[in-house]
Image (tube, helix red, strand yellow):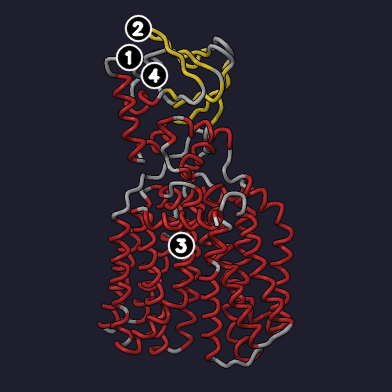
Amino acid sequence: MRRLREPLAAFAAVFATRDLRRLQLALIASVIADWAWSIAFSVYLYGRDGVAAVGIYQLARLVAAAVAAPLVATLADRYPRARVLAATDLARCALVGAVLASIAASAPLAVIAVLAGAIGVVATAFRPAQAALLPQLAQEPEQLAAANVASSTIEGAGSFIGPALAGILIATVGVRATLVAPVLAYLASAALCARIRAPAPPAADAAGEGEEHGGILAGFALVARSAPLRVLSGLLAAQTLLCGVLNVAVLVIAVRLVHVGEGGVGWLLAALGVGGLVGALPALLGSGSGRLATSAIAGLVLWSVPVVVLGAWPTALAAYVAFGLIGVGNTLFDVASTTLLQRVTPEHVMGRMFGVLEALVLAAVGVGSGLAPVLYAGIGIRATLIASGLSLALLTALCVPALRACERDGPREPDALAALRRVALLGMLPEAVLEGLAARASRVELAAGEVLFEAGAPADRYYVVERGTVAVLAEAGRRELTAGEGLGEIALLRDVPRTATVEATVPTTLLALERDVFVAAVTGHAPSAAAAEAVIAARLGGLRPVLGAV
């Protein structure tokens, strides 16, 4: 029971935490708006120029969004991510309103299509900013995983609730009136995001290899040089490639393979959505520390094996069960992969990394959708399903050791993390933020008697004593700091030079955090910022007036 209570408590804490609750409610509004917009506009295009117009628009939208995603996602690393989400929704609200006005004015189709395409481009900022914001709001790793479960569940439920609501609106009030719904929903999402209080993304430190100057290329560079990110992005691309194949295959499966008719398409997609909801609980149970890789592997197995079985034994029952299991697998892999990506990515470049993945997903879905008809014509629907499923299963088997390594790399530098957690000033930071600090901390080794810095030196780093002892020397006296104590916060937060000399009394190891990293973490979290002010007041007060700006 304890194994069940802990993740359920973390899930409940997601909606009990004010800003996480606002973010999830904003996601609900955004998902509803996305479906209402997509379906209503597709119906409008179909009624005006037929199925060809719908196909051309969807292809153009997909290509434009895939190209724009890495560029648009840089906003999430340059500005407060909650503001990026709010601005994205306001822009989509305005653009949908412009489309509605253009339709009412009988504007040329080219004008309407450009406005509609702009909505798809702007939308690529939302998912990267939302995924990058979650680690800033989560208080601990379990809560981060639970928040990802909530997000995945919302998107999964939206995949069949959203179209149903859009269909009801179109049938009752018509297409044009239905287009008002996304305007209102995007506006509601923007209002919720605007009320989220989160710090600006931290700047890259000196060891950041220039990502702060890399702009759009920083996300690509990070994925290229990081083994965990290469593995996760490769598996994500393979999974979404199969998703693209199934997007086209579902109609062929329903009509020609298992003979449930065109109406069966809706039931197969409903089974997929229900499976996604059912997968929320195992995803929550599997998202604890040490089980993310297992959850990701299970998700990929449930994506691949049912597809193979359906190709080998095509029956109506097998189809419904297969799509239900794929839905479960989709939630498992989505939650596990997103959480792993958040844990192994430096926070200052996380938005751009998710922007690269957004482009990768869009491209893979497009390739899969284009490849499917070619495969059907060449080897048939059954062989296509078997070959696609086996390919993903084989790739998953080959990547099991690498996935395990990704999981081990998640809470990087466990010793550094434990040392930072012991510092009163830092221990109250959210666990995800502490993990990011531990990953970016560098170690400084001092011999006995070696000076760390002298009075009057410029202040560029915050230090934590990991092992050993240092002496703080000033005109009025001397004090010693041991493991679990930090030094240097006052000079950094007050922007003044060092007013004391610090030297090691025994062989000592310190963790160093660069100015921008430390200041962004401490001042961006209200309890820690208050604690920092209390420390400054105490050290600059009457008790130790001359030991202040260390």
Amino acid carrying label 4: it is Val
Q: Position of residue 142 (x, y in %)?
A: 50, 51
Is residue 213 visible to us here?
no
Q: Which badge, 3 or 2, comes first in the chain's sequence? A: 3
Residue 411: which quarter of the image? top right
Compared with residue 398, is residue 62 higher up or lower down, i.e. above or below? below
Q: Secondary structure at mark 2?
A: loop
For image coordinates 65% across by 63% down, the residue present is 298
The disc placed on residue 150 is 3
Q: Is residue 54 shown above or below 391? A: below
**Disc 1 to disc 3, how far (Cα)?**
49 Å
The spot of residue 84 in percent (x, y) is 36, 55
Residue 544's label in the rendered image is: 1
Q: Determine which residue is flagged by label 4.
A: 550
The three-letter code of the residue at mark 2 reads Ala
Q: How many angstroms separate mark 2 from mark 1 (CA)?
A: 8 Å
Task: For the residues labelled 2 and 1, say whether their Cβ atoms are less than 8 Å apart.
Answer: yes
Between 72 and 322, which is closer to the camera in this rendering? Answer: 322
- Which of pointers 2 and 1 lies earlier in the amino acid sequence? 2
Mark 4 vs mark 2, CA separation in Å? 13 Å
Residue that mark 2 sits on: 476
**Image coords of residue 397 (percent x, y):** 73, 61
- CB-based contact (under 8 Å), mark 4 and mark 1: no
